[in-house]
Image (cartoon, grey):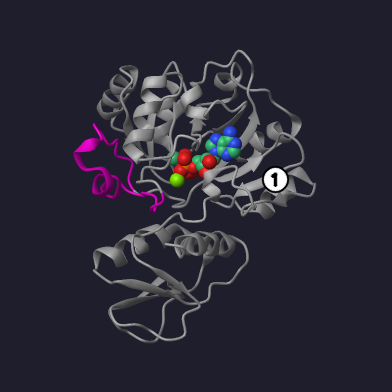
Amino acid sequence: MKINLANIKKAKNLLNKEECVAIPTETVYGIAGNAYSDSACEKIFSLKKRPKNNPLIIHYYNLKKLKGDCDFNDDFLKLYEKFCPGPITFILNQKKTSKISKVATNKKKTLAVRFPRHPVARNLLRCLKFPIAAPSANISSRVSAVTSTDVKDDFGKKIKFVLEGGRSSVGIESTIIDLRKKPKILRLGGLEVGVIQKILKKKISIKINPPKISAPGQLRIHYSPGIPIRLNAKKIKKNEAILLIKKSKINKTNYYFLSKKGNLKEATKNLYTILRKIKKDNYKSIAVGKIPNKGFGKTINDRLLKASKF
Ligand code: TXA
Ligand code: MG
């Protein structure tokens, strides 16, 4: 896509003034603010109605810019080399001298860091003197935004500026991996665990539903389109939409499919758009058909399970 430099400049000016702007990333749109500024980070929490104890992901242009804030380790460097910029977030130890706002981290000694691949986000990050704190650009507990229209639907005039970046190509949040000790996945996302495993060549544990919630991406209610979702539903209710992994022979208006032929990557990309569309089309609930529980199918099932707790 062609980059509009005037828009990037506008976003940069607002961020320099400790204001928030929405930015595109390849995973989902984010509500961005200066990660070194308490005031900017406070604005992010209040805009999103996000609980203060849920820390924000910090976005960097490259390793050089991260050096002052975090300790690196071998696993991190291997994954950075292979997948960054891209849809993966690392939990690392923060340096004592780190300038990241304590509001962004809820005073945690760790930091969630990410290097987005989207050219507009990269262009912006390259010309800023600080990293960007950015949670997904949706109201807390709701479906993330994958277009600028989604962001405007959720925030209206409350957000000063939405930087246009087209539709997010991955369409689901980044995979979060804790690399402080043995690698541990905290959130399934836009990068498959299998490909991470191949690079690290060691066992990776998956801790996406811990009994005690330590990272609220793990909150039970999340990613909700604002109407009930029923998994493995046998009978269809009145005013209900049916969500299927692939196109069905039944050609009714309440049938929605995530991918024409059941491709799981494509289905992941379409998930949030279709959930939002069903709500806009005025259905009162969603019945979901079975989705294969492998690769990206696991990410889709994780999101739908959490959304079904609405
Ligand atoms: O793809 C993404 O990651 C998007 C785009 C905008 O970059 N961002 C995103 O942010 O999904 P958010 O705030 O919606 O989700 C961030 C998750 C939360 O579940 C939060 O609890 C977790 O990251 N997190 C942040 N800092 C953490 C930390 N130090 N330790 C563990 N989890 C952390
Ligand atoms: Mg989120």
Answer with left or right where residue 276 lies relative to residue 80. Answer: left
Q: What residue is shown with label 1?
A: 184
Q: Residue furthest top?
A: 97
From the top left corner, tell me how far across and down residue 20 is, in percent: 32, 29
Which quadrant would residue 21 be assigned to in this image? top left
Q: Which residue does the image show at 59% across and 62% down from the upper left?
A: 298
Which quadrant would residue 243 be assigned to in this image? bottom left
Q: Which residue does the image show at 33% across and 22% down from the upper left?
A: 15
From the top left corner, tell me how far across and down residue 8 is, in percent: 31, 27
Q: Is residue 300 magenta?
A: no
Residue 228 visible? The answer is yes
How dense is the environment of label 1, judged by Cα within 10 Å: few (below 14), some, or many (20 and up)? some
273, 237: nearer the viewer:
237
- Looking at the rendered structure, the kind of residue marked 1 is Lys
Q: Is residue 162 magenta?
A: yes
Residue 2 visible? The answer is no
**Does residue 3 sit above or below 294 in this rendering?**
above
30, 218: nearer the viewer:
218
Q: Which residue does the image show at 26% across and 24% down from the upper left?
A: 10
Q: The C terminus is located in which quarter?
A: bottom left
Q: Which residue does the image show at 28% across and 32% down from the upper left?
A: 4
Chain part drawn in magenta: 141-166
Which quadrant would residue 43 be assigned to in this image? top left
Question: SS at mark 1?
Answer: strand
